[in-house]
Amino acid sequence: MSDNRIASGRIESAARIQTYAEFWPFYLREHARPVTRAWHYLGTSIGLACLVTAIATGNLYWLLGGLVSGYGPAWVGHFFFEKNKPASFRYPLWSFVSDFRMYFAFLGGSLGRELAKAGVAAPATDAAAARQ
């Protein structure tokens, strides 16, 4: 019996990733579709707003709201668009860190290079997609 599984159209080893340097490209490949990343950006933005609100008001319930609003949209992206299991199920801390890394790389304009290094192809343009 093989210990490989098919995820997002790729075969991924069931072996546990040992270092963050190995995890980061895996994380990006698990977020190959721009719509999945958009759902992450939405959740992260709302989560950060909740964190700021918690600090400003002293009401710690906003932190719970931040977690729910941060993970909820991200999981929508995975389950309905990327069609894979969120990496946070298996690597919660690295996934949490990588979500912010991806978010700030997107805002800073370096995400495209990171995706290319991880082997994530740039999305087809609408005209190219229509021809296929």
Image: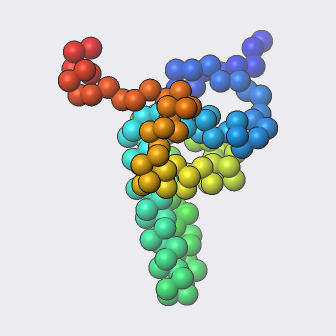
Q: Is residue 39 left or right of residue 7?
A: left
The tally of labels here is 0
On-image quarter of the C terminus: top left
| Nearer-the-camera pick, 64 or 125 | 125
User: Can residue 130 be seen by looking at this rendering?
Assistant: yes
| Nearer-the-camera pick, 72 or 11 | 11
Residue at screen point 71% across, 24% down: 13
Q: Quadrant of residue 33?
A: top left
Q: Does residue 2 lie above or below 56 as drawn? A: above
Residue 49 at what x, y percent from top left? 44, 71
| Nearer-the-camera pick, 89 or 35 | 35
Residue 42 at what x, y percent from top left? 40, 56
Q: Does residue 91 lie above or below 131 as drawn? A: below
Residue at screen point 36% across, 29% down: 123
Q: How is the image coloured?
A: rainbow
Residue at screen point 39% across, 38% down: 34
Residue 60 at what x, y percent from top left? 58, 80
Q: Is residue 26 left or right of residue 56?
A: right
Q: Does residue 52 lie above or below 96 as drawn? A: below
On-image quarter of the N terminus: top right
Residue at screen point 49% across, 65% down: 47
User: Can residue 72 be seen by looking at this rendering?
Assistant: no
In the displayed orientation, state which residue is furthest to the bottom. 57
